[in-house]
Image (cartoon, rainbow, N blue to C red):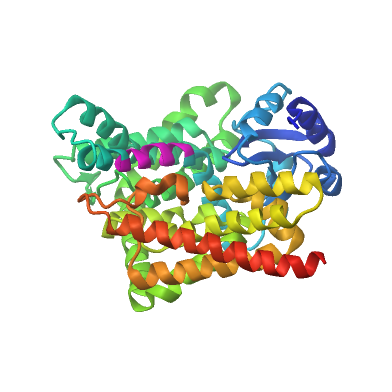
Amino acid sequence: MAKNYKQMAADIMEAVGGEGNVSSASHCMTRLRLNLKDPSKLNVEEAKKITGVLNVIVQNGEHQFVIGQDVPSLYEEVSKFDIQLGGTVDDAEAAKADKEAAGGPVATALSFIGGTFSPVIPVLVAGGLMGAVLTLLTTVFGVSAESGTYQVISAINQATFWFLPIFIGFSAATRLKSNGYLGAFLAAILLYVTNNPLTDSSFLGIPVTTVGYNATVFPIILGCLFMSVVYRFLQKVMPISLRTIFVPLLTMLVTVPVTLIALGPIGGWAGTLLANAVFAIYRAVPAVAVALIGALTCWMVFFGMNNATYPIVFALLAEVGSDPLICAGMAPANVAVGGACLAVALIAKKAEEKSVATGAGITALCGITEPGVYGVLFVKKYPLIGAMVGGGLGGLICGLFGGTQYVISTPGFISAPAYIAPDGTWGNFYLMLAVMVIATAVAFAVTYVLGKKVEK
């Protein structure tokens, strides 16, 4: 049965207290994200009952309606209401509500990182998989690296990660209720300095450390955090008649030198330190480390923390050239959710349950697990056990034999080319396929056995 997105949008607006209570709206791959002026007006229980809404999550003042991969269709209807779409919100009540709704500092930081990367995921997936396409072109189809075809595909892949800070800058600044375009501008300046190093490495006599800002995330995130403080302060103290000219001017005049002198180098150092620390843990106990990722990914998805792992992924890619931990562990975890959901579909007697579980299972096999996690695993509980067992076992095997993922993509069967080594060898590809098949089969079997007992 097709979803009525217009009705869903109207029901959501009613559940949150009307369109006048929505200060801004955006969406990621599977969730509609709303910022509310008065969160107390949200009726969570009624919102969860809306047809098509799998769950409602509140993180750091943001209200996330879990929909599935068709969330852009819902967002199109939501955008017809009189609300801001991913824009800047200078609302004292909204800021106060965000502060009250925020958890501890760790939860706030993870929520910020996850919310920053969520809108960028489509770019990362498209650009990342282009690297796998290049490998296929040269190893399978014999396309020359000197050909125009290869160079065009390569441009798509390289541009994604060379200009990554611009996407992150826009998203982070928007998330911080600053100015997204100034965030992108700050990133563009960092990239310009990277491509055109300063002939005199100083500013007002203060040394400026040379850092390669392309394909990094921590420097621009720190820069945007500082920029948001400067921007908000100037917005508050500057007369309205002067804001248009002097707020952006003074914001960049203060932010850029501070970022180049201090925050950028600190961010670069932090990224390297993080990669070395994570990789040291992986080298010490690879099987255990990847098994834990495989077993616990569904919990990270449930709490909305899975996107907060992207800085670790980029740090690993920059330092070791692939990700043998996070994405490698999430591959068996994601497909295990698919196996568990398909087992539930086989057991279920009601047509609606079969339909939901089947759709969620197929989607999870492709790497998108929110529908399965919220609509099946945490509803029935026993498929959660099956998915954790399958994902954990798959992660254990992956860690034991050194499986890895070479490019950014959504871990799952649909992203299989991401496991082909850049040198054209196929050993890792076959290993990861075997890992995912085993994880799917084990999750299916465990869920089916448990489900037969529970449903009986």
Residue 130 counted in the magenta span: yes
Report whether 356 appears left or right of 370.
right
Q: Is residue 5 above or below residue 316?
A: above
Q: Where, quadrant-wise, is the N terminus in this rendering?
A: top right
Q: Which residues are magenta?
A: 122-132
Q: Where, quadrant-wise, is the C terminus in this rendering?
A: bottom right
Residue 71 appears at what percent x and percent y?
64, 35
Q: Is residue 97 visible?
A: no
Q: Is residue 449 visible?
A: yes
Q: Is residue 73 above or below residue 223?
A: above
Report whether 408 appears left or right of 88.
left
Q: Main secondary structure of the magenta part?
A: helix
Q: Nearer the viewer, residue 291 or 310?
A: 291
**Which residue is located at x 65 percent, y 28 percent?**
73
Q: Is residue 7 above or below residue 355?
A: above
Task: Examine the image and state in which quarter residue 343 appears.
Answer: bottom right
**Which residue is located at x 33 percent, y 74 percent?**
283
Residue 268 appears at what percent x and percent y?
32, 55
Residue 97 appears at what percent x and percent y?
73, 47
Residue 32 appears at what percent x and percent y?
66, 38
